[in-house]
Image (cartoon, rainbow, N blue to C red):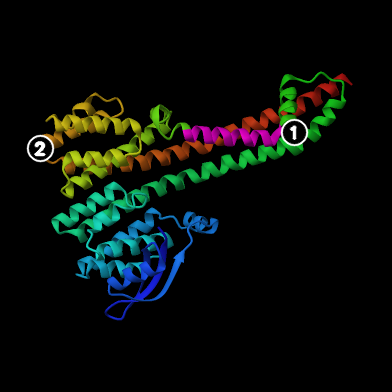
Amino acid sequence: MPLFDYRAKDQDGSNIEGVVEAPSDQAALDELTERSLIPFFLQERSEKSVWQFSLKFLNRVRTRDLVIFSRQLAVMVSATVPLVQSLRILIKQTQNDNLKIIVSEVADEVEGGAKLSGALAKYPDIFSSFFVNMVRSGETSGRLDETLNYLADEAEKNYDLMNKIKGAMTYPAFIVGGLAVVGFVMMTFVIPKLTDILLETSTELPISTKILIATSGFLQKFWWLLIIFMIALAVTARLSTRQGPGRLFWHKLQLRLPIFGNILQRIYLVRFTRSLASLMLGGVPLTRGLEVVAGVVGNEVYRDLIVRTIHEVEEGNSISTLFLESSAVPAMVSQMLVVGEKTGRLEEILNRLGNFYGREVENNVQGLVTLIEPMIMVILGLAVGVMVAAIILPIYQSIGNV
């Protein structure tokens, strides 16, 4: 059904803008009139153009946008500003165009009598099941402002953690990318000119020099084939790991990777513990909380473990039963879950575990960066040494034969 952008005046004479879904422009006008709005601008949106898709990609909703949205909405709700009016104000304050459209549609839904959580649930790509369930718990308990503030705090924690990881890996990624570019230029432009001189001599070339010449010749003639192969490999890997056995195999492999597996394991544990603690503190039942967390943890190994744990809890068993048996869960986590259940402070224990593993991730990433820098230098030295030796050695041999 077509979407129409509109600008109108409400009963108080204030200008509002938003999006309405209707089969025709007349139907859109009728719907706006039913909402007691006086439209003075109405235009059908064309969503099929490449330009629209490009704008949507460039303006995709980021974690920081949701943090600001949650924080501002919490401030207005706590100041007793009506929810619909708060959302209308946020439409003007939101910088991201995609989020602005979504907030406008959510405001229309709420104005029509829907609950905020129900309206947000219609946009699962933007508002996760965790976010929606937390909002629903806030509506039920009458503490929506506190819940929104809590969501903003948790989103900020996750945002800061992922930013630290990305920032720490930027330098190594930049160095590796630079080395790849320099290596490609050397092999396709510099090395051929040097090896042409060597080929003109009658000296028997070492095996390292022959390999270097063959590699350089291949890259010169078939560099496009290498690019196609790399793209095909990336697409195949992406498609095979999106679902099914391939996805499970890849996620198992992630946890077994040297150094990186340890960091990834802690990231998944942070998501599990923080998310479940937040849901339980918001009054969400344990089994429902586990269902939500299974969808946001981001790893099939842990998702399978959580799904099986739901069945255990429904049968009256402890949440820690399967965790104690799993090799993917550190013994400390399992034992702390046991303590939390026995003392009735499971939410507090989960929160402490989330904070602990969050600090562990930061320390491990920083240590990894410190380790990667000298490793890159050693690998660079070896690569340059092999390349130089492959060129210099035959030159020395030809001089010795003179």
Q: Residue furthest left?
A: 343
The amino acid on which the numbered mark 1 sits, given as a three-letter code, is Lys
Q: Residue at x 73, y 31 (%)?
A: 216
The answer to whether 5 is drawn above or below residue 38 in the figure is above
Q: What crowding class fits label 1: few (fewer than 14 Cα within 10 Å), some (14-19), or many (20 or more)?
A: few
Disc 1 from disc 2: Cα separation: 69 Å
What segment carries the magenta color? 219-239
Q: Residue at x 48, y 54 (%)?
A: 57
Residue 94 colored magenta? Answer: no
Q: Disc 2 marks which residue?
A: 343
Q: What crowding class fits label 2: few (fewer than 14 Cα within 10 Å), some (14-19), or many (20 or more)?
A: few
Q: Disc 1 marks which residue?
A: 221
Residue 384 vs residue 65, the one in the foreground: 65
The amino acid on which the numbered mark 2 sits, given as a three-letter code, is Thr
Q: Quadrant of residue 345?
A: top left
Quadrant that contains the C terminus: top right
Q: Nearer the viewer, mark 1 or mark 2?
A: 1
Quadrant that contains the N terminus: bottom left
Residue 222 colored magenta? Answer: yes
Q: Position of residue 226 (x, y in %)?
A: 65, 33
Q: Secondary structure at mark 2?
A: helix
Q: Secondary structure at mark 1?
A: helix
Q: Residue at x 18, y 34 (%)?
A: 337
The answer to whether 168 is drawn above or below residue 44 in the figure is above
Q: Position of residue 152 (x, y in %)?
A: 29, 56
Residue 96 shows in the view: no
The answer to whether 20 is drawn above or below residue 259 in the figure is below
Q: Quadrant of residue 285?
A: top left
Magenta stretch: dominant SS?
A: helix
